[in-house]
Image (cartoon, rainbow, N blue to C red):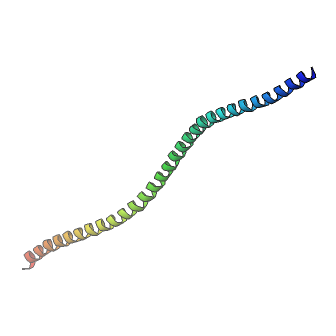
């Protein structure tokens, strides 16, 4: 009776230990694998998607804003300078030409 009791106790203890270790290991491995696979994929997908979207949006917005601001300012400054220079020169040239033409004509008719 004692032998059987001790043997069964020992057997159950050893095998339950082994069984629990195996089952726990298998369960944990499977569950963690499944969990990691599903949630890490979801997390990475969401996180990367969100961050890439945010950072690209921010970068593009900032960069384009800076670029446009710098280059449009430069462009406008240069071209308005050129435009004003050209228009004023053309206007002065035309005006002086017209003035001289009109008044020389008038002068010649009056005094000559």
Q: State the residue lying farthest toward the right.
A: 2
Question: Residue at 7% of width from left, 75% of height from top?
Answer: 109
* Apparent side of residue 92 relative to residue 75 in the rendered image (left or right): left
Image coords of residue 15 (percent x, y): 78, 28
| Left or right: 51 in relation to 74 | right
Of all residues, the one furthest to the bottom in this rendering is 112
In this view, 6 is above or below 73: above
Q: Residue at x 32, y 64 (%)?
A: 79
Instruction: Name the foreground residue: 52 vs 23.
Output: 23
**On the rendered image, what quadrant is the C terminus found in?**
bottom left
Instruction: Identify whether 68 is placed above or below 84.
Output: above
Tell whether 39 sits left or right of 23.
left
Task: Please report the residue visible at 46 percent of the width from the left and 52 percent of the height from the top.
Answer: 60
56 above or below 107? above
On the image, which quarter does residue 47 sit in?
top right
Query: 48 or 91, which is in the foreground?
Result: 48
Q: Position of residue 81 (x, y in %)?
A: 33, 68
The image shows residue 49 at horizontal and vertical percentages of: 52, 42
């Amino acid at each position: 009776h004692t032998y059987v009791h001790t043997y069964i106790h020992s057997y159950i203890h050893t095998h339950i230990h082994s069984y629990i270790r195996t089952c726990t290991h298998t369960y944990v491995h499977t569950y963690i694998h499944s969990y990691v696979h599903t949630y890490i994929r979801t997390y990475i997908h969401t996180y990367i998607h969100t961050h890439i979207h945010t950072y690209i949006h921010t970068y593009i917005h900032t960069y384009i804003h800076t670029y446009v601001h710098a280059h449009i300012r430069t462009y406008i400054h240069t071209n308005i300078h050129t435009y004003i220079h050209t228009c004023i020169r053309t206007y002065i040239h035309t005006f002086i030409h017209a003035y001289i033409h009109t008044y020389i004509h008038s002068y010649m008719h009056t005094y000559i």
